[in-house]
Each structure stands twice: as C-alpha cells, then as structure tokens.
Amino acid sequence: MSFQSPTIHRMITMQVKTVQEVEEKSKETHDDKNNRLSRPMSPHLTIYKPQLTTLLSITHRGTGVALSGVTAGLGALFIFTDLPTFVQFVHGLELPSAAIMSAKGLVAYPFFYHLCNGIRHLVWDAGKCLTIKQVYSTGYGVIVGSLLLTVLSLAYTT
C-alpha cells in the first residue's frame, strides 16, 4: 500500500524587465527602496535613553580599539628603533612632567578600564552578578576601579 503526498500547485507570473529597469533598480539605495515601498523607518537609537550598560559597552569597544592602535603603533615604531633609543629621544624632547604624566594617563586609563570591564564580563560568563542592581553596581565599580588604578599607577611611576 502506498501513500501519495498531496501536490500543491502555485502559479508564479514571471516578469520580463529591460536592461534599463534592472540598472535603475541597482542604483537605488536601501533608504530609497524603503521610501518607494512606503516602509516605516525603524526608530533605532533615537527612541532609547542612554543607559550605563550601553555607555560602558561602547567604551569597552572603544578602549579595545584604542589599545590595539597604540600597540600596533608602538610595534611599528620599534621595527625601526629599540626601546633605549626611544626613551633617549623622549628625554631629549625635554617635555614638562605634566605632559609626560598626561600621556601616561591617556594610555593607562583605557588599559585599566578595559581590564576591569573584561573581568566584569568574565564574572558574567560565570553566571554571577546578572541582576539589574548588580550589573549597575559592577558598572560603577568598573569606572571607580579603573580611575583608582590609573591614579595609583601614575603616583608610583618615575
């Protein structure tokens, strides 16, 4: 005994288009197509109030990119010179100590922020501190901790 599955028939009308019609459509942007089809535009970021978690996430990504850039820049610099020559060059500039401390802080803060927030993410990956209250308190802890570590590292550098 054999069973036959029901067959579904559907008619599709094919349209022939000229080369000009195809080329015209290919020049159409995504926004133009949505306007032509009267599709509503998604409100995206305009309707959302910035939250601490959003800002910390964006900052984490930004510090990661900045640290990668600094690492790549220093790596490229040391292809052409060695560390003692670079240190001698910086001493030869005779920069005020405030400028040197500021430069150190501009590197130290992103490093410590990325470190603290990375630890926070590892804690989340372990399934800990996931309530809204804990997420916000650890977020403020990341900000305070990275500032504190930056100040301490600048205080104990020569």
Image (spheres, helix red, strand yellow):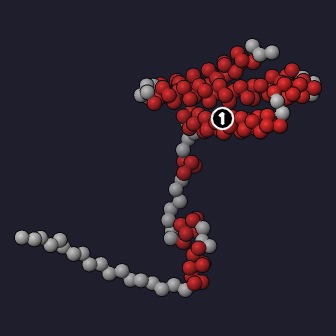
Q: Is residue 67 visible?
A: yes
- Seen at 32% across and 81% down, the residue is 11
- Seen at 59% across and 83% down, the residue is 20
Q: Residues within 10 Å of mark 1 (few under 14, many from 20)?
A: many
Position in image of residue 69 (x %, y %) = 71, 39
The three-letter code of the residue at mark 1 reads Thr
- Seen at 53% across and 27% down, the residue is 120
Position in image of residue 34 (x %, y %) = 53, 66
Position in image of residue 67 (x %, y %) = 68, 34
Q: In the visual, does 75 lie left or right of 46?
A: right
| Image quarter hosting the N terminus | bottom left
Indicate the quadrant where residue 106 lies.
top right
Q: Is residue 90 visible?
A: no
* Secondary structure state at the residue bearing disc 1: helix
Q: Is residue 36 above or below residue 115?
A: below
| Image quarter hosting the C terminus | top right
Tell which of 68 and 53 is nearer to you: 68
Residue sitting at the far left: 1
- Seen at 51% across and 68% down, the residue is 38
Position in image of residue 138 (x %, y %) = 53, 24
Q: How many marks?
A: 1
Tell me the residue that label 1 is attached to: 63
Tell which of 102 and 49 is nearer to you: 102
Q: In the visual, does 25 lie left or right of 74?
A: left
Q: Is residue 93 above or below residue 69?
A: above
Residue sitting at the far top: 156
